[in-house]
Structure formats: C-alpha cells, structure tokens
Image: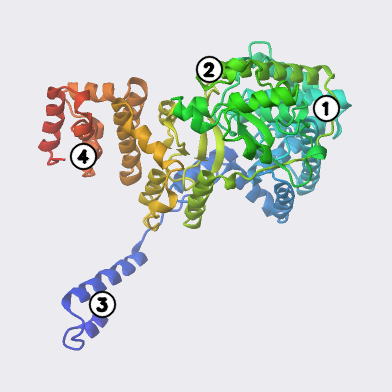
Amino acid sequence: MAYLRRFSPDTHPEVDDVQLDVYLDRLNKVRQITRLSLNEEKITDSGRTVDDVVEIFNRVNSGGTKLSKGDLALASLCARRPEARQELRKNLDRWNQLGYGFSLDWLLRNVTAVATGRSVFNALGKVTPEEFERALWSAASHIDTFLDAVSTRLGLDHAQVLMAPASLHVASRLLELNGGRFDNDAHRDRVLYWYVHAALWGRYTGSAETALQQDYEAAARGGVDALIKNLERTRGGKLTIRPDDFTGANRGARFYPLLYTLTRACGARDLSSGLELRAENLGQQAALDIHRLFPNEELRKAGYERGHIQHLANFCILPANTVDLLKKRAPADYLAEVERDQPGVLESQWIPVDPKLWRVENYLEFLQARRELVTAAAQKFLESLLSGAAPSKNLKPIRVRDESENPAVARLRAAVEELVDRGFVRPKFEVEVTDPRTRRELVVADALWPEGLQPGIGDPVVLIHDSNDGDLTRLTVLGYQVFTSLDELVAYANRGSETIEELPETDYADPEPVEAVVAVAAADITAEFTKTVNEAIARAVSETGYRPGQFRRMVAEMGAVATARKLLATKQLSEGFSTLWEFERLDLTVEAAVIDERFAELFTDQERETARFRLEQFGFRG
C-alpha cells in the first residue's frame, strides 16, 4: 500500500495522522473483500421436494428475503413458460380492482388444485406448460363463478368480509370436478353453507395443506355432501352455532362476516328510514358502516372493559349517514324512537326490544340477549341454505365506508406506509390469529406481520392496541412478538435495522393517548411487570439475536412473577443470565426487572437482594 504515502503529512500537511488511520482502515476493509472464501454447496438429490428445497434455501439465506413454496414452484414453471407470471398477475389485478386482496401464492395454489387435485406446490412439477395454461383459465373461471355466488347470495363483495380465502381452493376443485358449474340453485346454496361453516370454524388455519388435501379428496369422492361430512366430524357430528360462539372484538373477527351476511341477506332495515339495506334503496353514493348501538364513550364512562365495548353484539350495520346521526346518542333514547316510529325495524336488526336492556347499566345483559337473537337468525339462515329453502335474492354490491376515515386507523396506516418505504413488508390489517393446534381465536390483530417485519428475519409480529383483547401469553409461547403500542413497534423496527432512521414519535401516537395513559395509571402492577418482562424478551431477540425460548415458555405457563421467583430461588445462574452477560446486556435480565422500584411490592427483600447481588457480581448496578 505504498500509494498511501501520497497522503503523508510531509506531502499533504492537511491530512493528519488520525485521518490517515481512517483512510487506511477503510482501504484495508475493501482489500479484504478479495480474500473472502465463499462456500458453494450444490444439492443434487432429485428426491428433494419443494418443501425441502425451500427449507434449505431459507436456512442458508437466513439474513435475506424469505422464499415461499410458491416462489420456487413459480420459478420452475416460468423456466418452461416465461409468460406464466404475467398471466397470473393479470388475473390478480382484475380481482384486486374489485376489492379483493389475493396474492400470487394464493392463485398459484388454486391453479395447483385445479390442475392436479393436490395441495402441495411440487405437484406442479409434472404439469406441462399447456396444461398450466388450461388450468389457470379454468381456475380463474371457477373463482369468478364462486365470487359471484358469494356476492349475490351472501353479500360478501369485498376483501374485508370475504371469509377464509383458502376455502376458494376447495370451491375451485369442486367446480372443476363438476364441469365448472353448480348443478342448480340448491346445489349452489349447499356449497355456500359449507363455505360459511368452513370459515367460521377455521377449517384451513393451522396445517392448511393437510385439510385442503382431505377436502380435495372428499370433493372427488362425494361432492359438497362429503365436504360437509368432513366438517361435521371436526365439530362433533353437527354444525351448530351457539350464542357463546358469536364473539370477537372488531371487524377482523371470524364472526363479523356472518353478521354482515345476515344484514345483507336477511332483510335488515335502516334504523333511520326503515328501508331494507339494499343497493336499490340506498343509492349509488351510499355506504355502509358499523354503528355501535351503545356509544364507546358512554361504555367507557360506565367502566366496561374494551373487550365488551368492542364486542360484535354491539355492532349494527347501517348506512354511514345513519351512523353519523346516531353515534353519540344514548340507546335508551333513539331505540325508543325507532320502536315507536318504525315498527319491526329493531327486530330486523336482531336488537332486543325490552327497554330495560337499552340502559347502560344493563349492557352485559343486552349483549347476551342480542347474541341469542343473532345466533338464532344465523342458524335459521344457514339451515335454509342447506335445505334449499333460502329466499331467492340477487344482492348488488354496496360500498363500505373507508376505514381510513377513522383517525386512529389513519395514523396506523401512515406509520405502516412509512415503514414500507423504509424496506419493511406490508402487514395484514384487522386479521384473526388462531392457535395452530386448537384453531381457537387468540386475537384479532390491528396489524399482523406473519413472516416478520422483514421476511426470513425475526419472529412474526402482532400489533394490538389493547392487551385485554387477546391471549397474549399464548401468542408469546407461539413465538410472536406482541406489541400493544404503535410507538413500541416502530422502535422495535428501528432497532432491527441499522439503515432505518428513528420515526418521529409524535407523528404516530397511539390512537387514544388519553385512554392509554389512564389505562397505564390504573394497571395492575403484576400486569405491568409481565409487560416489562415481555418487552425485555423482545429486545433481547432484536438487539442481541438471543432467543430465550425456555424462559419465554416459563413466563407463559407460570406467569412472569412466579418465573422470577423460581429463578431467584435457585443457586445456579440461568442460561439466559449468562448469555445476556456475554452480550453485556444484563439490563434485559429478569433480575434487572426485579430490582426496579416500580415492582418492589411484588418481591420480598431477600429476593430483591439476591437479584441485586447477582447483578453487582457481574458489574451491573442498574
């Protein structure tokens, strides 16, 4: 590196020794690139499946973009038919313009079902380019046929209310086996009966490929009747909706589309005009929206929990202008007027007519009564689909008020767009997260990143603005990073990428900052300790790469306080403590949380002294 002598202080006095060291260090790093030894390992085993290859690729490429099974299958297909991707995109664009948010993987799986009757992508390996072209054309046609039935019969005409998109793979396979059509109106309605129940009971959550394959085979064996039998077996022999099933906390809940369907298909009427909620009655410019029968503010003042406030049984689908008219009025006032001036309208919306239930102090009884009314209507409607006795209606699409008009939603979307611009992936909004083992709903996430903020890097991420709305403990056990604050999520994203500048906190404050402050002030100290411990886990993963799996499971099973006490009672230091000491991050240990003065009353003096002694032994003083 003799050429560096040109920068010597003798010839260039403006370059001092410090600058020269900087230049030398940079040039040495550049020079080291030529000495890198890159390992190349070829996998030649022809017996590898698509799943195997994707798994190998993602393990080797753990620091980059994650490859999906569909990506590899499509790459193989495009090698034989280069225009395949463009043909798929053309159909996706057409559906997306109609308000459906289908993905490339989703459509490719649908084509695989039509072409092969298999649920795995490696089945496409035996499909010729000509067969793929025919299958894509058929799949697109079957999807159009099914969407038309779902829209005109159930009123599910946009992405927010379209139930279980994975069910459309089975519907396409069924139509392919049936010549691309329904036998008659009764046959169509039986398929819709199966579709609604498949969605309600999470048929394709968890091990979706297994359930899909079972249903492809059932469709080939016995058509829609066999599909219904498959579902009945998973539900104890009978498909019945009960009042306790009708739960959820926002329009992302599994049962929300059912309420929307009942409103559209069963003659629900406007509380203001008394007219049935049909496109012909509302006009082209009208939009539907969710009306809270009991206003949120009134319920908060009365001390009800958010899970009760946002309960589906408090939702009523009405024209947006009626929602604006009634949203701040007490139900005891306006429901009495509706009952007096529009006889039968309350019944059409499954609203209890007992005036005692319209008072805020009887709100929980109101929820129970309305759940029973809605459940009875749902059961009756679904049974009419099954029997072929459902009333014949041709529902036309009705616009739904854009959620971005809600300031809280607008703030969340703005923050997401900022993150997307900085290289993170776009999440799913108001989406249900279920337990893969039990298929139980764990939470309806305000935003969900199922593959992590950057695919292949980090854990799946859930944002939910109220910790009371879901089973956060189970989510943590399943490996989700759970955030109850938008600011915390943004900070987590910033810590995970050195190239991302910190976003201004004031731009993306939580949707209801005043309520959040009140909630924290009134929070149980045990819950606050649990939150602190879970935040430390998240920071350990994002800032050091250490994943405290055993500790995370202990917290989920025993609770954070009991876990801390158990660890303090043992003489041997935990693996987590030792690992975090190696990373010089003892501030993320449970011992550091224990000595926090906020939680002094949770632990004995001896426990706090043990925690402090351990930390001081290794140079940490808090």
Task: Locate the C terminus by quadrant.
Answer: top left
State yes or no: discs 1 and 2 in contact (Cβ < 8 Å).
no
| C-alpha span from label 1 to label 3 | 79 Å
Whether residues under marks 4 and 3 lie with C-beta atoms below 8 angstroms apart, the answer is: no
Q: Amino acid at mark 3?
A: Met
Spot occupied by residue 146 in the image (x, y as percentages of width and height) = 78, 35
Q: Which residue is mark 1?
A: 188
In this view, the residue in front, 563 or 127, is 563
The disc label shown at residue 586, or none? 4
Marks 2 and 4 sit apart, C-alpha to C-alpha, by 50 Å
Q: What amino acid is at disc 2?
A: Asn
The residue pinned by badge 3 equals: 1
Q: Which sits in the foreground, 410 or 423?
A: 410
- Against 163, residue 487 (above or below) is below
Kindly identify which numbered label has been placed on residue 362.
2
Task: Choose the circle earlier in sequence order: 4 or 3.
Answer: 3
Q: Residues within 10 Å of mark 3 (few under 14, many from 20)?
A: few
Question: What's the residue at 42%, 33% (across, down)?
Answer: 479
**For the residues marked 1 and 4, what is the alpha-carbon distance in whole angstroms?**
62 Å
Q: Is residue 163 visible?
A: no
